[in-house]
Image: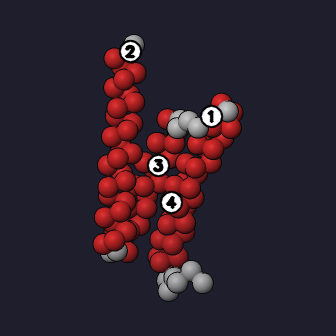
Amino acid sequence: MLHADSVLELWWVLFGLLAQLMFTGRFLVQWIASERKGESVVPVAFWYFSLAGGVMLLTYALYRKDPVFVLGQSLGVFIYGRNLWLIHAKRKREA
């Protein structure tokens, strides 16, 4: 079921599953924030969950040597990091 032939492989699969849960958690964060505000919003936590989940998934993709997965996650990690950079730069300017 998990396609793990060794204990090491099992740990990598579990890491990948945790990474996917972290990445999926960003949608829950966004949904809850939007419901609380009564309109669609993207909270800063969304970007942190995106970055953490993206880095974890990229690590898993590199281990699996999956070029499609690596390419997709690499671009995402850059975008999530850039959004956080812009958010913090704006806050610094406004302070």
Q: How is the image coloured?
A: secondary structure
Where 8 falls versus 91 (above or below)? below
Q: Residue at x 52, y 84 (%)?
A: 3
Q: Nearer the viewer, mark 1 or mark 3?
A: 1
Q: Amino acid at mark 1?
A: Glu
- Residue 27 — which label? none
Looking at this view, name the residue that lies furthest to the top: 95
Q: Amino acid at mark 2?
A: Glu
Q: CA gap, disc 2 to disc 3?
A: 25 Å
Q: Mark 1 highlights which residue?
A: 39
Q: Nearer the viewer, mark 2 or mark 1?
A: 1
Q: CA gap, disc 2 to disc 1?
A: 24 Å
Q: Mark 4 highlights which residue?
A: 19
Other-residue count near label 4 (Cα within 10 Å), few / some / many at <14 / 14–19 / ≥20: many
Q: Earlier in the sequence, mark 4 or mark 2?
A: 4
Are the residues tagged 4 and 1 within 8 Å (C-beta)?
no
- Image quarter of the N terminus: bottom right
Q: Is residue 9 visible?
A: yes
Q: Amino acid at mark 4?
A: Ala
- Residue 94 — which label? 2
Other-residue count near label 1 (Cα within 10 Å), few / some / many at <14 / 14–19 / ≥20: few
Q: Earlier in the sequence, mark 1 or mark 3?
A: 1
